[in-house]
Amino acid sequence: MIKAHQINYKHKEFHILDGVDVSLEYGEFLAIVGPNGAGKSSLLSVLANEVKSKQKILFKNKSINDWEVKELSKHKAKFSQHNSNDIPLEVKDVVMMGRYPYFDAQPKKEDLEAMNNMMYETDIFHLKDREYNTLSGGEKQRVHLSRVLAQLQNEITHKLLFLDEPLNNLDVKHQYKALEIIKKFTKKANSAIVVLHDLNLAAQYADKILLMKSGKVSAYGSPQEVFTAENISEAYNFPCTICDHPITNNPMIIFG
Amino acid sequence: MKTQSKLYFYIIISAILLIIIAVWSLNTGVYDFGGKSAFEILGKIIKGDPSLSLSDKYVVWDVRAARIIMAILIGSMLAVSGTGLQGLFKNPLATGDLIGLTSGATLLAAISIVLGGHFKQYLPEAVQFSLVGISAFIGALLSMMLVYRISTSGGKTNVVMMLLTGVAITAIGFSITGFLIYISKDEQLRDLTFWNLGSLAAATWTKNIILTIVLIISYFILLPQGKSLNAMMLGEKDAQHLGINVERLKKQIIIITALMVGSCVAFSGTIGFVGLIVPYILRLLFKSNYAFILPLSAICGSILLLTADTFSRSIVEPSELPIGILTALMGGPIFIAILIKFKKLL
């Protein structure tokens, strides 16, 4: 799906990313975790081609720079951490932006369908005529999630979704709901790279975990492999205990 | 699909309104056609009636009709340039006059009027003819690039910086134009006063043809960008993820708005606030949906300027009020209204 070798990214003389390798298969859900300032968002930006890095990133076996911008937008979408607070439009107009790559002047029937379906999935359909600026933080997050998902509603196989802390401001129900939606998306041979802060949720939903510290990969593998007491205590500089989740048998991390 | 037919509905309604105002405007004025209405004269002109007196024909065709068409073209372009700039800067206060584009254009136009005479003979004929227009375009473009460089970094606009840069450019333009007025000869002085006050009285069909060409080129590029300007509200990176070539879009808006503002200044001087008033009113109806307000501002700008111009030449008959007085009278309160709304957001 996407392959990147030895990514370096510097701001002035400070290494934000230092020799990071990433490789993702079709249908994989990769969670990037790590303490603040570890370079998670930067890594996601580099992979999503937001900032130019000198290293080659291969997306579907073709350098990401060789892709045509409009074509690329039908294969991958990104949910950003800092979404604009000031968009003086109605919610449905914001979600419809996700369909912009697909129509010229007027939305087609499938665009309206995709918009409505995604608003249902993210539980914002009742807000569709509200003004975006009057929504709460969590509701705004769901609007953007809905927009990003609507962008990838098409016939193309193997799509890739980048999400930078999609669970911010969401209540418990919608946190789980969002992860269920992403999981469902990856079940259809699509892939997702998600920056998460909640390690237990990452353990429960992700196929692979990339644990970062100070711009380097400190552990990579399945949740069982990465989430060991040594790895986590070392990365976060905070004591923790690992036990089995009583229901799912995934590792469960208890801090303190 | 519903939204699209809504757009067409508003376009048709406002176009009809524009035609009604144009008809009213054609029949407004002090000249007496000897009991006949202006429409009869217009009918005769179209039919090529030989019984038509030359002065009647001149007043209806070369004075009034030319002026009406010029008001339509200039008003439309000023409004669209305002809407386009607001999309680029993501702020309803960005308009050609407030951020200094108009001043930059006026400044270079004034320089070319006063100093142009000295080196005019060395230039090719085509350039000589359009010297003022080209200088105005260059002036607008340079101010635009300066404002953009100073006020925008990393895709975010600092509104205070944007407006203050405009103030600075206006101050420079004001002082140099003042100096030019001081040193200029009588004939040049009349031209300069015209640029500063703004007027549509100098309308001719040749100017209208040039303005029409500028308008068609500009709208061909700018009007289909409504969607892209909407996406820009998400932020530049997110717009890029939606398949929009953000760098190209920004360059297009910068060059096209400079071209439109420059041509408007060259032919009608500085008529302020049209680019502020029209998008403001449209935003009250359609929020900030550029897919609506961009095409609609093209028509509503014409409506506003044609109405204002017809009033300006009929209120104090037989004299004429400078049109800038009327647009500023409407624009000032709207400027304050936007500021108050903006303050609440802070």
Image: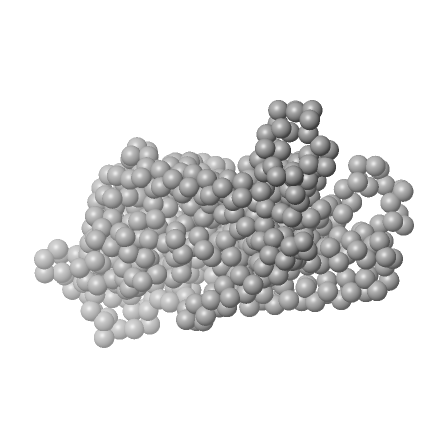
Q: Position of residue B164 (x, y in %)?
A: 61, 68
Q: Is residue B296 left or right of residue A147?
A: right
Placement of the N terminus of chain B among the 4 image quadrants:
top left
Q: Is residue B140 visible?
A: no
Q: From this viewpoint, which residue is outermost toward the bottom?
A: A256
x 42%, y 36%: residue: A104
Q: How many marks?
A: 0
Q: From this viewpoint, which residue is outermost toward the front?
A: B35
Q: Is residue A129 visible?
A: yes
x 55%, y 36%: residue: B220
x 45%, y 70%: residue: B340
Q: Position of residue B64 (x, y in %)?
A: 64, 42
Q: Position of residue A182 (x, y in %)?
A: 25, 48
Q: Nearer the viewer, residue A225 or B115?
A: B115
Scheme of colours in the image: one colour
Q: From this viewpoint, which residue is outermost toward the left?
A: A247
Q: Where is B36 relative to A204, above or below?
A: above
Q: Nearer the viewer, residue B85 or A71?
A: B85
Please identify the quarter of the rendering in which residue B123 is found.
Answer: top right
x 80%, y 36%: residue: B126
Placement of the C terminus of chain B among the 4 image quadrants:
bottom left
Q: Position of residue B211 (x, y in %)?
A: 65, 40
Q: Where is B125 relative to B317, above or below?
A: above
